[in-house]
Image (cartoon, helix red, strand yellow):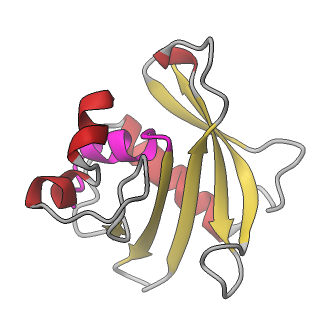
Amino acid sequence: MDTDAITLRSFLTAGDSTFTVTSVKSGTRYTYRVAEGNPSGRTAAERQYFVSVLTGPDNRDNYSYAGMLFDAAGALKPVQTKGSKLPALAPSWMGFVWLVHRINAMQDLGASAEFDPMGRCGRCRRPLTDPESIRTGLGPICREQL
């Protein structure tokens, strides 16, 4: 998948994305799930997302709520809430904040980190098969709907 900021932003805010970010320097990896909150009645600039981090061995069910991601005035804003299960300085949360700051600054990941969308569409989670879908992390139908 392309790791330019525009493609990453589209993938994160597609509605139901799961992905892994791996530090090239340390090899540390975290898997995140970003799911859109109830979108009815909201404009694109008011969208909110729930962020969870994989914290156990089962990559389907062992996610812990980490915080919210808000789409505010064109910039993404990660925020921990009272319900966050991770401390504010947890390395996994700090990694997510780092990723969002890179996206907001319009910087690609370059050689600092690897981004893996796990072969699934960031909106509907269907397997990605065609080259354009793999490059963007979004299937053809979901790309048209964004």
Question: Quadrant of the image for the C terminus?
Answer: top left
Report the residue at 47% width, 18% height from top. 44
Residue, far left: 131
Report the residue at 72% width, 75% height from top. 62
Is residue 118 placed above or below 132 in the rendered structure? below
Q: Position of residue 67 (x, y in %)?
A: 72, 47
Q: Position of residue 21 (x, y in %)?
A: 43, 69
Report the residue at 66% width, 58% height from top. 52
Query: Within the image, what quadrant is residue 145 found in?
Result: top left
Q: Quick check: is 13 in the magenta stretch?
A: yes
Is residue 63 placed above or below 72 in the rendered structure? below
Decide which of 28, 42 is in the foreground and name it: 42
Q: Position of residue 126 (x, y in %)?
A: 37, 60
Decide which of 122, 86 is in the foreground and name it: 122
> In the drawing, does residue 146 fall left or right of residue 38?
left
Q: Count all numbered tags in the image, as a single digit.
A: 0
Range shown magenta: 1-15
Is residue 40 placed above or below 103 in the rendered structure? above
> In the drawing, does residue 100 fall left or right of residue 5?
right
Decide which of 82, 49 is in the foreground and name it: 49
Decide which of 5, 10 is in the foreground and name it: 10
Query: Within the image, what quadrant is residue 27 found in?
Result: bottom left
Query: Within the image, what quadrant is residue 111 found in?
Result: bottom left
Residue, far right: 82
Residue 62 visible from this viewpoint: yes
Report the residue at 75% width, 65% height from top. 64
Q: Quick check: is 130 in the magenta stretch?
A: no
